[in-house]
Every structure is written in C-alpha cells, then in structure tokens.
Amino acid sequence: MNVVLIGFMGSGKTTVGRRLAQRLGYTFIDTDQFIEGELGCTIAEVFSIQGEAYFRALESRVADRLKGLQNVVISTGGGMPIGPGNLERLRAAGTVVFIKAGLEDILARLERDTRRPMLKGGDLRERVQQLLGERLPTYEQADLVVESHGKSVNRVCGEIIRHLGELRSQAAGDKPTAKVAGPAPAEGT
Ligand code: S3P
C-alpha cells in the first residue's frame, strides 16, 4: 500500500511526506530527488540544459515506475500529475492525496525561492496564480484532498492517516465517506 502526495510547489509535500512515512513506517521517496539522483544533476540544470519537455518526459517515466514499489510515501513534483496520463499512473501506484495549501501560504514559502525553474522571471504572485488556476482541476481529482492552512505537519499527517483508513474500509465494502478530509482530533504540533 502506497501513498502519493500531489500539490503545488511550496505546499509542503516533502515535509508532510517525510513525517507521514515515519508515522506509517514506510519508505519516503521524493520524485525530484529521485530524478536528480539518477541524472546526477539538479532539476534546474535539467531545465536549462535539456528543456522542460525533456524533464516532463522523465517525470512520466518515473510516474510509470512507481507502481512497482511497496509501502512507500511518494512526494511528487508539482507538475507531475499534470502530464498526460500521469494522474492515472500515480493512481496505479497508490492512494493519491492532494495537499491543498492556500495561495498566501504558497507565496510565503516560495518568496525567496531561487531553485525552481517554473517560477523564474515575472511577478511571482501572477505566475503562481496562473499555474495554480491551470492545475487545480487536476489536483482536485485526487482520492483525498487535505487542506493544510493553519495546521501543523503532524495534524495534516493525522488527517491523512485517518482518511486513508476510511478509504480502505470503504474499498473493502463499508459505508462511503466524504472525499475532503475534515478536522482530525487535535494533535500536538
Ligand atoms: C515543478 C515543481 C518542482 C519540480 C520542478 C517543476 C512544477 O517540484 O518538479 O521544478 O512544474 O510545479 P516541487 O513541487 O517539489 O517544488
């Protein structure tokens, strides 16, 4: 059983993913780090040397390979679910969870970012708003949507764990439950 985290840049997928993996006793994988490890260079270098299309093709290949893994939490690059067929590839790999961060939270985290090629040039707010608008409809197709605003990493993880349990018992034939995760019982920060 795997968990696949999707969401915009700066929405906390990697931080949540690491903690979630710890709590579930799973292995953590970050698709960007995986690609960097395989190529021996940074994502920014791939974009500047080979171009975005090359990176997107790599992402699709990686998405396809994820289904072979067991008991992993996978944090994906923000554009991975957007590539044609990739959301289906991610679904084949595990339960897809959208970490839904608000625009202001995202902007605050990306404000000083210098390493993400998709954010280079122009006004950051306009760029993020435009990309987010294009991508939200795809992100919303996740099996589970967890809003992160104002919540600690532990609380987000707690909600994911609780709703994974519900989705799994639902799949096993129990009563259906809502897709959007509601508040979990209070947890420490
Ligand atoms: C991208 C997001 C990045 C990385 C690449 C492209 C995107 O990952 O894959 O820079 O298109 O949204 P993070 O979401 O981890 O920042």
Image (tube, helix red, strand yellow):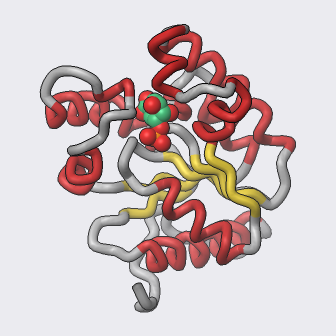
Number of marks drawn? 0
Quadrant containing the N terminus is bottom right
Identify which residue is drawn at 58% across, 11% down. Answer: 54
Identify which residue is drawn at 16% across, 22% down. Answer: 122
Please state if 147 lies on the left or on the right of 109 as rendered.
right
Q: Which of the 4 image quadrants contains residue 36?
A: top right
Identify which residue is drawn at 30% across, 40% down. Answer: 113
Instruction: Pinpoint residue 188: horizontal percent, then vertical percent.
Output: 43, 90
Front-lying residue, 150 or 14: 14
Q: Residue furthest front?
A: 40
Front-lying residue, 68 or 178: 68
Q: Which of the 4 image quadrants contains residue 117?
A: top left
Please state if 71 lies on the left or on the right of 162 as rendered.
right
Q: Which of the 4 image quadrants contains residue 18?
A: bottom right
Quadrant containing the C terminus is bottom left
Identify which residue is drawn at 54% across, 29% down. Answer: 42
Please state if 159 lies on the left or on the right of 137 as rendered.
right
Instruction: Pinpoint residue 40: horizontal percent, then vertical percent.
Output: 67, 27
Q: In this view, does 53 lie above or below 73?
A: above
Instruction: Pinpoint residue 130: horizontal percent, then vertical percent.
Output: 23, 28
Instruction: Pinpoint residue 175: horizontal percent, then vertical percent.
Output: 64, 75
Q: Is residue 180 above or below residue 93?
A: below
